[in-house]
């Protein structure tokens, strides 16, 4: 991978219909795009949003920008993360780099919490597909020391207050990384996937493992739905309301309550 600018292409969504989406690769400078709710709607909660794409690209429209837009319209600040891609063509990056990008994003949002109207104790992560795996790893590795710290932001905790894993594959061996340990230190977890997605075969076991470890967890499996639904214009009716279920879970868990 060169240090040339990011590469963009337009792809078709997996859903039926014409729903063109933006796909990004060649990411050398991690960044976050900020979506803030109107002050009258603001709950103080926030998500770092990690799009998927097999760690070789990022499907940033249906699993990034649209998700962040929906969250901000419902009172939740959102920050779409562009993270470095260890499986991109010619990539010089590793999974450690991707995890570091997520952890830096969490710390950055906490460091600017007052400016952005965010409660630093209610910053979570949401990831899709590969982004879900990344979110799960970051949630488990928050206590790892920062390699080559650059400023006071790196002194802040990178522990998410909650996590949403949307058809991701956390807690498994990935790209040479050991399986993410499941302990009670993991944040409360929301999980959703399609019943026609092979990952749906693993999600019930992950649910039971989290439950046994004492981690609060909620699971939704949508029948007849495949991988990669995100937020698109042409998704099956049953899965199109998954963001509402996420917000319901956050409400009953107390994450939308202003402190």
Image: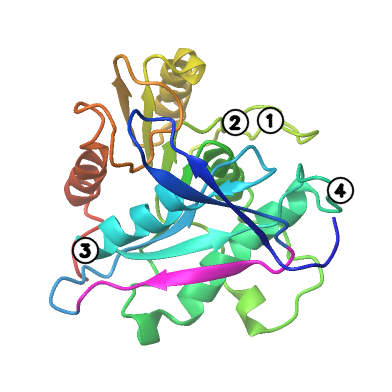
Give the spatial CA distance, label 3 vs label 1.
36 Å
Q: Secondary structure at mark 4?
A: loop
Instruction: Answer yes or no: is residue 75 visible.
Output: no
Residue 30 lies within the magenta run: yes
- Residue located at (28% from left, 35% from top): 234
Q: Quadrant of the N terminus?
A: bottom right
Tag 4 residue: 90
Give the spatial CA distance, label 2 vs label 4.
27 Å
Q: Which mark is residue 171?
A: 2
Image: magenta residue range: 28-38
Tag 3 residue: 73
Residue 93 lies within the magenta run: no
- Residue located at (71% from left, 32% from top): 174
How many numbered circles does the render carry?
4
The answer to whether the residues at label 1 and label 2 have Cβ atoms under 8 Å apart is yes
29, 185: nearer the viewer: 29
Seen from this angle, which residue lies furthest left? 40
The answer to whether the residues at label 3 and label 1 have Cβ atoms under 8 Å apart is no
Mark with earlier residue (2, 3): 3
Q: Secondary structure at mark 1?
A: loop
- Residue located at (52% from left, 40% from top): 132
Tag 1 residue: 179
Q: Indicate whether 214 appears above or below 62.
A: above
Location of residue 203 by image quarter? top left
16, 197: nearer the viewer: 16
């Amino acid at each position: 991978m060169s240090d040339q600018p990011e590469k963009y292409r337009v792809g078709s969504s997996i859903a039926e219909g014409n729903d063109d989406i933006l796909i990004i690769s060649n990411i050398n400078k991690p960044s976050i795009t900020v979506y803030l709710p109107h002050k009258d709607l603001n709950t103080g909660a926030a998500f770092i949003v990690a799009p998927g794409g097999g760690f070789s690209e990022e499907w940033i429209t249906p699993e990034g920008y649209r998700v962040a837009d929906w969250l901000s319209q419902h009172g939740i600040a959102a920050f779409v993360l562009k993270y470095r891609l260890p499986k991109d063509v010619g990539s010089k990056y590793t999974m450690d780099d991707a995890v570091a990008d997520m952890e830096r994003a969490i710390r950055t949002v906490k460091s600017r919490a007052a400016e952005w109207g965010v409660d630093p104790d209610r910053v979570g992560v949401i990831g899709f597909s590969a982004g879900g795996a990344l979110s799960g790893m970051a949630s488990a590795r928050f206590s790892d020391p920062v390699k080559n710290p650059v400023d006071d932001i790196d002194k802040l905790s990178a522990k998410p207050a909650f996590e949403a894993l949307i058809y991701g594959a956390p807690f498994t061996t990935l790209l040479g990384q050991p399986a993410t340990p499941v302990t009670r230190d993991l944040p409360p977890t929301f999980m959703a996937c399609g019943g026609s997605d092979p990952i749906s075969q693993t999600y019930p076991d992950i649910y039971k493992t989290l439950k046994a470890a004492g981690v609060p967890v909620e699971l939704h499996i949508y029948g007849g739905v495949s991988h990669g639904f995100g937020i698109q214009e042409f998704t099956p009716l049953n899965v199109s309301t998954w963001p509402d279920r996420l917000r319901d879970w956050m409400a009953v868990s107390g994450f939308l309550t202003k402190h």
